[in-house]
Image: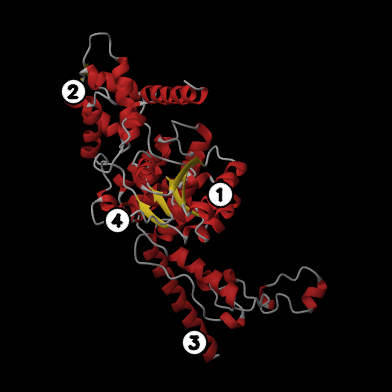
Amino acid sequence: MGTGERLNLFEHALKERLKKEAPLAARMRPESFSEFVGQEHLLAPGKALRQAVDADKIPSIILWGPPGSGKTTLAFLIAHVTHSHFSAISAVSAGVGEMREIIHQAEERLSTQGQRTIIFIDEIHRFNKAQQDAILPYVENGTITLIGATTENPSFEVISPLLSRCRVFSLRGLTDDELKVIVQRALEDKEKGLGNLNLTVDTDALDSLILLSQGDARVALNALEMSSLSLKEGEKVITLPVIEGVFQQRALTYDKQGEEHYNIISALHKSLRDSDPDAGLYWLGRMLEAGEDPLYVARRLVRFASEDVGMADPQALVVAMAAQQAVHFIGMPEGELALAQAVVYLATAPKSNSIYDAYGKVKEDIKRTRNEPVPLHLRNPVTSLMKEAGYGKGYKYAHDYAGHFVRQKHLPDSLRGRRYYRPGSLGFEAVVEKRLKELQRLAGDEKKENEEK
């Protein structure tokens, strides 16, 4: 036997050994579409992605979905059926040199053999802009076909020119029933799974395993494997305490820098706006229990107090600021109740966006109109020169008038009569509206009195 043959046998034996010693989730990875569980909206016969794969006419695509939904598995299934050369790299570890070499080989392969190259980039959201720019020309001219996998919204994480040249396919988190199929297969499979151990899982333990896996097949299989290793010699049943011991603490799906962060804060804001205290408390808990910065939450509640409650209940801003101060003063976890109190208060408070609308109009007028000088009578004549120039001339001191109110010009001439703040009819704003109408009446009486004089 030659040296080359011995080396090939050694490499084959090493691969087989690594395959057997790989984690259960890796060993149970489907090798055909008939074994693939879930994503029927993409992979059922007749669906666009399945047709492209079956025809071996795969465009550049981005696979976007939560962890454990099958993105990497799908990419490797494509590798099994395609006649293109398939290269897989991780955005975490791939360097510029490696990327250049792969592209160089792809160019040679295309020119000499007419064979296209598919490059699979796992976690493509970790490629920075420069790295994505570097592969763009080769995707554009057809040197490579790109398959990117990401858990992050590609709208935010993939540069627009590259994204426009890819089709985005959204994968969904696996359902409970789909996860149960995957777990059951792993328990029964004697070649790749745990079938030789003859294990069973109690119903309540299986339900807990599925719940805690949160639609992630990798988490479910890893937990199942850890549970099997936790059993004492001779034990064949995985019980609820075993599952709970493996998970210890439930890992919540939450990325403080990613899309889920913005999705959940949006859910909190909209729940409060719609006066739903229960949903508000739930989304608050989802953030805090996942480790969100409580002061970030407090800042958002302060914003909400002015944006969506405003003058309908001026106390809302006071409560929100008090919650912020409480969190800052006593920290967590004690501060969580102050935030919860603020959430309930804001949810149940009367709502008004009058302040938000009013200030929006102010900003728009400042942008589109000439920034005129302050009327002379509103300026303080702090020097004799200013007094001679007319500063403060004709100014009326409100406290000298009935009701401590006087009507005089305050806005620049181009905006005279402009109204920004229009109170609503709920809560304290009803009182404000009544007060403004009374001031208008007083202004009318004053104008009439001046005309009579």
Q: Which residue is mark 1?
A: 103
Of the numbered discs 2 and 1, the one sitting upstream in the chain is: 1
- At mark 1, the secondary structure is helix
Could you give the CA–CA distance between mark 4 and mark 3, rounded to whole angstroms? Answer: 81 Å
Tell me how far mark 3 sits from mark 2, CA to CA: 87 Å
Up the image or down, 153 lies above or below 403; here it is above
- In this picture, is 150 found above or below 47? above
The mark lying in front, picked from 3 and 2, is 2
Crowding at mark 1 (Cα within 10 Å: few <14, some 14-19, many 20+): some
* Disc 4: which residue: 51
Left or right of 106: which side holds 202? left
> For the residues carrying marks 4 and 2, which lies nearer the camera in this image?
4
Residues at badges 4 and 2 in contact (C-beta under 8 Å)?
A: no
x and y, in percent, of residue 185 in the image:
23, 30
Task: Work out how far the residue at label 1 is from the one at label 3, CA to CA, in angstroms.
Answer: 84 Å
**Marks 4/2: CA distance?**
40 Å
Mark 4: secondary structure: helix
Q: Residue at x 52, y 22 (%)?
A: 3
Which residue does the numbered mark 3 point to in the structure image? 448
Nearest to N terminus: mark 3 or mark 2? 2
Q: Amino acid at mark 3?
A: Lys
Crowding near the residue tagged with mark 4, few <14, some 14–19, many ≥20 C-alpha atoms within 10 Å? some
Q: How many other residues sit within 10 Å of disc 3, few (<14), some (14-19) or many (≥20)?
A: few
